[in-house]
Amino acid sequence: MKVAEAVGRALCAAGVGQVFGVVGSGNFHVTNAMVAAGARFVATRHEAGAATMADAYARTSGEVAVVSVHQGPGLTNAMTGIAEAAKSRTPLIVLAADVTEPRSNFYVDQEALARAVGAATARVTSAEEAVEQTCAAVRLAVRERRTVLLNLPLPVQALEVPDGALAQAAPPAQRAAVEPEAADVAALAELLGRSRRPVFVAGRGSRGPGSGQALEALAERYGALLATSAVARGLFHGNPWSLDVSGGFASPLAVELLQGADLIVGWGCALNMWTMRHGRLIGADATVVQVDDDPSALGAHRPVHLAVTGDVRLTARRVAEAGTEPREGYRTPETGAALAARLRWHDVPYEDTSTRERIDPRTLSVALDEILPAERVVGVDSGNFMGYPTAYLSVPDEQGFCFTQAFQSIGLGLATTIGAALARPDRLPVAALGDGGALMGAVELDTVRRLRLPMVVVVYDDEAYGAEVHHFGPDGHPLDTVRFPPTDIAAVGRGYGFEAVTVRTTADLKAVRDWVAGPRSAPLLIDAKVVADHGAWWLEEAFRGH
């Protein structure tokens, strides 16, 4: 057996079952070896799409995925998706062929590329160690929650591995749950016992099995309200004391209640400028606690009064065990009535600016939330539009929302939704895109059709890079560089084999209702011509970080 085959089979033996990629000469044999060993391979039309699909699949499924790319340009094409995964600490293997001869036209310093975007690196250096080095890369990805570039040099791929080499391949042990210190548990329990208005904000670190339930139980004991960062949206869906998302996408009532908290506890949450609106969601006298199993994350974005190193689920359980008698806390009848009446963005009045030619994106989003099945998985691209689907399209749980925004690149939303859809085939996938991101990533419409995914692609089409229009326009800057002529995006969708509808008014949404009713034999693209007369409410807040 040659190294290329051994590496592919070792990855499968280490627990990898899903591979995305574009196959070239350098990764041909190793990719085929993974398929032969039982992995599912999805061929994408661009490596950036492959990397983003693998990222989204890993986030949604909780399993390590692989993106397989050709040496040199295959890797550079994938770098934006790899950067997003690395910044998000997604356990992911980037399997890249590698040339070792600097005079080769394919040569680039692949390890330097990976390090530049925050990914870890590993390399197969010999036939004797190929299997162990491959399994070590998977262990690194799992135990340290890292995106790992595994370089597979072309000269090494052709070597023969020793007999029995695959016997040492096995799935890695999961990352050990970090037990909090008893003193930290007691301190947090004391703070909760004194608090009159506590709020929990759960982030990416709270998406693990049992974490949401443990937080809900602890919050009930102390009367805490529950919020999430954007990446954990849906974690507390259905809980009457949920504020939904904290940060730029928060509703006015959620902002009011967050600012009124006397204790904010971030659970596996960075409490960064996005989630805390540059600190403006934290009251002047509020106590801030952060719980994370990575000590380097504690206090990284803002000072905290108490930093607890510990696994979210374990810490919540230990605090509950150490706690005092239950308290009403923030869960007063007045708070409950307000949450029931006006928490949702649907319940916030607005002036509908729709015309006969263009639909208000809020009106569009409210209607789509009612029309589309509730069991859905929503992927969102980046841009001025992105707050509308995030705020108005409900999701059933934290696996119903995939938010690849750590790098804030446009063009990843469609690939994000494909990866999430493959991880949750039981749900309707909904990709929410701007026209800029939709056209940038349109090549993967072919992948949607080829995989026969019953996907809804919603394009909020304002014929511009809207974030830049609304950021620079008020100051009188010329905007010709960020505005575009009208494009028939529905026709583009039909060209890829989609059913498609152009939406200018709510009456045009009848075609969406008809598609939902069945048989859904082809995916649906909605080219929504949205009004573009003002920036989204969250945009000013977002640009504070630029």
Image (tube, rainbow, N blue to C red):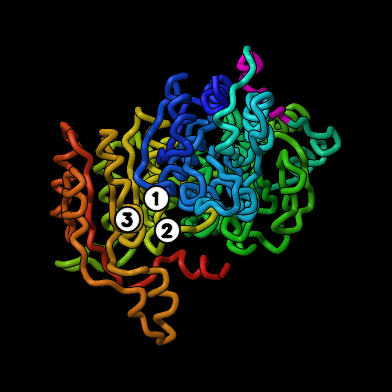
Q: Write the residue at 71% across / 41% down.
A: 292
CB contact under 8 Å: marks 3 and 2? no
CB contact under 8 Å: marks 3 and 1? yes
Q: Write the residue at 46% across / 67% down.
A: 539
CB contact under 8 Å: marks 1 and 2? yes
Q: Position of residue 93 (x, y in %)?
A: 56, 36
Say which quadrant the N terminus sits in.
top right
Circle 3 SS class: helix
| Gap between marks 1 and 2 measured at Cα | 7 Å
In the rendered view, does 55 fall on the left or right side of 521?
A: right
| Gap between marks 3 and 1 measured at Cα | 8 Å
Report crowding for label 1: few under 14, some 14 to 19, many 20 or more residues within 10 A (C-alpha).
many
Mark number displayed over residue 246: none
Residues 41 and 216: in front is 41
Circle 1 SS class: helix
Report crowding for label 2: few under 14, some 14 to 19, many 20 or more residues within 10 A (C-alpha).
many
**Amino acid on which disc 1 is placed:** Gly
Q: Position of residue 208 (x, y in %)?
A: 59, 32
Q: Position of residue 343 (x, y in %)?
A: 45, 51
Reading the image, the residue beneath label 1 is 413
In the rendered view, does 59 fall on the left or right side of 179?
A: left
Reading the image, the residue beneath label 2 is 410
| Gap between marks 3 and 2 measured at Cα | 9 Å
Q: Position of residue 411 (x, y in %)?
A: 39, 55
